[in-house]
Each structure stands twice: as structure tokens, then as C-alpha cells.
Amino acid sequence: QVQLVESGGGLVQAGGSLRLSCAASGSIFSIKGMGWYRQAPGKQREWVAVITSGGSTNYADSVKGRFTMSRDNAKNMVALQMNSLKPEDTAVYYCNADILVRSDLVIRGYWGQGTQVTVSS
């Protein structure tokens, strides 16, 4: 079994910063791409950032220049540093990973449970 657990959400004023973390654990052979998504109330889940196993990143236009995603392959962890936060960044943030599972060497997609980020104006 594989688990993704996010942490680091909270309440912050506009212009502030938060750092989200996501840790993968379980029967992991290797982790391919990892990403962050978010879902605001009444809206569809949207992609925020992605990082490859080699460390290449890509960001949604709405967060480019403000958010930075990083990865620690040794610890099976990713982080999302969020700066210059805006009220429109308020959402539940989810971690996603494509993981090669040790038991059957099949790549499956996994989601964390989400962490709430609230930015007050």
C-alpha cells in the first residue's frame, strides 16, 4: 500500500508565505512525476505545479514566479514554497504522484488527503 500525506497548510494574510510538504510512503519502488493541485470551493480541481523525477518543474500561469516546487528523491518528498500569496490562492491543496509499486511493478497514480490553505485579504 502507498500513502501520500500533505502538511503545512494554514491561514495566512495576503502577501504572506506558506510551505507545503508531501511525503510518500509504503511499497514504493520508484516515484515518477509528482504534482500539486488545488480545489477552491465550488470550482474544479486545477493543476498548480509538477516536477519530474529529474527535477524539472513546470507551473500554472497563475502561480508562476510566486510558487516553487522542489523534490527530495531520497526521502520521497516534495515541497511547494508559496510566496506572495493572494486570496484567490485559497483552496485545498492536493499532492499527486505516479508511483511504481514494488509489489507488482505497475505505475499507479496516488493522491493525498489534501491540506487547506486560506489567504485572507
Image (cartoon, rainbow, N blue to C red):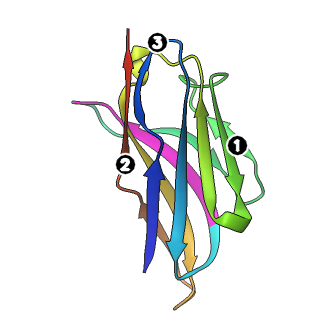
Q: Which of marks 2 and 1 is nearer the N terminus?
A: 1
What amino acid type should be assigned to the residue bearing mark 3? Ala
Q: Residues within 10 Å of mark 2 (few under 14, many from 20)?
A: many
Q: Earlier in the sequence, mark 2 or mark 3?
A: 3
Kindly check if marks 2 and 3 are in contact, taking CB atoms under 8 A apart as contact.
no
Residue located beneath label 2 in the image: 114
Residue at image coords 52%, 72% = 25
Q: Residues within 10 Å of mark 3 (few under 14, many from 20)?
A: some
Q: What element carries label 3?
A: loop
Q: Position of residue 87 (x, y in %)?
A: 39, 15
Q: What element carries label 1?
A: strand
- Quadrant where the image shows the C terminus: top left
Q: Position of residue 101 (x, y in %)?
A: 54, 81
Is 42 within the magenta? Answer: no
Q: Is the magenta stretch mostly helix, strand or loop?
A: strand
Q: Which of the labelled discs sits on residue 13, or is there none?
A: none
Q: Residues within 10 Å of mark 1 (few under 14, many from 20)?
A: some
Q: Which of the labelled discs sits on residue 14, or is there none?
A: 3
Residue located beneath label 1 in the image: 57
Q: Residue lying farthest top? A: 121
Magenta residues span: 32-41
